Image: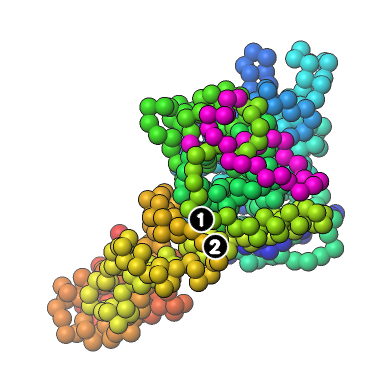
């Protein structure tokens, strides 16, 4: 796992106190620790008169808009055609209606900045992690007990939260609300999700211990990854084409028999271009009641760049015009080598009962890598564990994505001005403009062929990618990082100057202007967490204090009281 390496659950009689977390200088309010992990916990039940309804929200002060509650209601239950008897787990994702601030906000933003892309919180969306139970109950009018326990969070920790639900949900259905209060109280004792730290996460009698090898009763390889090999088994021979479709931000719909299969497959697709961030919208489980249903199913415009996971047969007709449809049957690991299945034409997809496969007219830019197919087929023949197969597949996707992105990283790094061009007395220099043609020229000698043996139309793939939301998101992030680096280098250059000597050679007005500018730069550096040497901020503050003390008393009083904007 990129965050902590390994997550272990060990039995424990009582949770011990966790180590001090960074940012404890901030005064923690009740439920702040809980909010670092979860927004709230919901219980969704079925009422004969009202239909699906949120019965419980905990903690009780948690804020959800009516629109958010409606989304949670409809997304927390499988479609009736899924026929999910017993216990079912899945995940959904929906838009946040309004922004909210936490007292821990600044600290969590800093922690989030240091996380790899696959573990960053989702600023505009919530994830819902569902444990749904449907069992026969003759005492109820409907004849069935139907209820979902749902964890609402900004964090994409799929494996962690599904494990938490497996541990707490069965007991909750017996003990109800007092048990839920105890669960939430435990989570409110968790330390913040800090990268590279050993964390003890107590939850109802066990401690989930992260990044430390101990005698374990349950072992999870990561906090966030899905079982990649299991998810891609139904479309085994098309993994490379699917990688291209996700990389290019093409509209893809996954049609599956249940929310478990649909959500796992969508999450697997999104993760296959890691460490590149998938920048478009994706919905692991999407229903006809979703607030974006009309927006995403209209035929009056081209389908948007989004990956949808659906189970309702109605979508087979509604989304017929979508260019890429992945049809998944019931996911199970193959006991024998999967047979090759050709890409199917879209006109052959008439109902949700169509055979599993990929329905598209897309022609991949790259030649198919037969080696990975053979390696995974051999694993099936030798009964290699699914976890090992997933590791092989994940490494393959990682190396493919890195081979693709390294030439872009190399070219974008060349847009950075030379350090010698940074003058303390001028504004930081600007990054040079990204030129598609200049980048294409670099591919002949420094393209993906340096790290990948795959043949094909790499140039065409890059040209398509440069028009995609994934490129826009990636380049925006890289440009921001490089601009912040230039700001940091500019501050370091200022620190190395004798600013007091400069102020003595200039008027009081110019000196006051310099002090105010330096104060603003300090404020900006702190707010944006600029990547500076540890002592730069202290040096700059010392420069400011020294200059102020050299000024007349009346100006000293004003400048010492003056804040920053």
Residue on which the image places disc 1: 366
Q: In this view, does 12 lie to the left or right of 503?
A: right
Label 2 crowding class (10 Å Cα cut-off): few <14, some 14-19, many 20+? some
- Does label 1 or label 2 sit earlier along the sequence? 1
Q: Residue at 48%, 36% (x, y): give it.
A: 323
- Up-down relation of residue 184 to residue 113 (above or below): above
**Percent of width and height locating residue 237:** 64, 48
**Percent of width and height locating residue 476:** 38, 57
Asked if residue 259 shows in the view, the reply is no
Label 1 crowding class (10 Å Cα cut-off): few <14, some 14-19, many 20+? some
Asked if residue 389 shows in the view, the reply is yes
Nearest the viewer among 339 and 536 is: 339
Q: Residue at 55%, 66% (x, y): give it.
A: 453
Give the alpha-carbon distance from disc 1 to disc 2, as whole Å. 7 Å
Contact? badges 1 and 2 (CB < 8 Å):
yes
Q: Quadrant of residue 300?
A: top left
Q: Quadrant of residue 387?
A: bottom right
Disc 1, SS = loop
Disc 2, SS = loop
**Percent of width and height locating residue 25:** 54, 63
Q: Main secondary structure of the magenta part?
A: loop
Q: Quadrant of residue 543?
A: bottom left
Q: Which mark is residue 454?
A: 2
| Region rendered in magenta | 323-351
Instruction: Based on the picture, tell me whether residue 333 belongs to the magenta stretch.
Output: yes
**Percent of width and height locating residue 218:** 81, 54
Instruction: Based on the picture, tell me whether residue 103 belongs to the magenta stretch.
Output: no
Quadrant containing the N terminus in the rendered view: bottom right
- Up-down relation of residue 84 to residue 239 (above or below): above
């Amino acid at each position: 796992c990129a965050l902590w390496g390994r997550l272990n659950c060990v039995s424990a009689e009582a949770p011990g106190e966790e180590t001090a977390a960074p940012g404890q200088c901030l005064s923690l309010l009740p439920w702040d620790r809980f909010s670092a992990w979860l927004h709230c916990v919901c219980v969704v039940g079925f009422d004969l008169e009202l239909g699906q309804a949120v019965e419980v929200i905990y903690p009780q002060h948690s804020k959800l808009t009516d629109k958010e509650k409606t989304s949670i209601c409809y997304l927390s239950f499988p479609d009736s055609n899924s026929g999910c008897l017993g216990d079912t787990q899945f995940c959904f994702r929906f838009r946040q209606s309004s922004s909210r601030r936490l007292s821990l906000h600044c600290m969590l933003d800093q922690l989030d900045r240091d996380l790899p892309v696959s573990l960053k919180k989702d600023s505009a969306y919530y994830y819902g992690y569902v444990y749904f139970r449907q069992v026969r109950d003759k005492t109820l009018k409907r004849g069935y007990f139907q209820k979902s326990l749902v964890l609402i969070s900004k964090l994409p920790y799929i494996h962690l939260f599904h494990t938490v639900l497996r541990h707490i949900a069965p007991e909750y259905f017996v003990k109800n609300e007092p048990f839920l209060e105890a669960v939430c109280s435990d989570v409110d004792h968790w330390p913040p999700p800090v990268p590279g730290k050993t964390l003890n996460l107590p939850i109802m009698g066990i401690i989930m211990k992260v990044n430390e090898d101990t005698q374990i009763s349950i072992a999870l390889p990561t906090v966030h990854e899905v079982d990649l090999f299991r998810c891609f088994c139904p479309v085994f021979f098309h993994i490379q084409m699917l990688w291209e479709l996700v990389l290019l931000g093409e509209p893809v719909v996954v049609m599956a028999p249940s929310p478990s299969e649909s959500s796992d497959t969508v999450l697997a697709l999104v993760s296959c271009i890691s460490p590149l961030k998938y920048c478009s919208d994706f919905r692991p489980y999407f229903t006809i009641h979703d607030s974006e249903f009309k927006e995403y199913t209209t035929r009056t415009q081209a389908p948007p760049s989004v990956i949808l996971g659906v189970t309702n047969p109605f979508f087979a007709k509604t989304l017929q015009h979508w260019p890429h449809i992945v049809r998944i049957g019931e996911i199970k690991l193959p006991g024998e080598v999967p047979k090759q299945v050709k890409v199917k034409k879209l006109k052959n997809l008439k109902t949700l009962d169509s055979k599993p496969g990929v329905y598209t007219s897309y022609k991949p830019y790259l030649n198919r890598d037969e080696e990975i197919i053979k390696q995974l087929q051999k694993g099936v023949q030798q009964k290699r564990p699914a976890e090992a197969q997933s590791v092989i597949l994940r490494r393959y996707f990682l190396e493919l994505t890195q081979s693709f992105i390294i030439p872009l990283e190399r070219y974008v790094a060349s847009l950075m001005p030379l350090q010698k061009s940074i003058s303390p007395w001028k504004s930081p220099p600007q990054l040079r403009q990204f030129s598609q043609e200049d980048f294409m020229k670099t591919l002949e000698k420094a393209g993906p062929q340096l790290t990948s043996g795959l043949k094909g139309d790499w140039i065409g793939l890059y040209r398509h990618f440069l028009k995609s939301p994934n490129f826009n998101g990636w380049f925006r992030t890289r440009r921001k990082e490089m601009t912040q680096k230039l700001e940091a280098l500019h501050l370091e250059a200022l620190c190395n100057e004798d600013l007091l000597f400069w102020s003595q050679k200039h008027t009081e007005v110019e000196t006051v202007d310099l002090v105010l500018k330096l104060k603003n730069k300090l404020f900006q550096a702190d707010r944006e967490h600029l990547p500076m040497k540890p002592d730069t901020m202290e040096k700059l503050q010392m420069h400011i204090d020294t200059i102020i003390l050299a000024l007349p008393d009346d100006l000293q009083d004003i400048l010492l009281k003056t804040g920053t904007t």
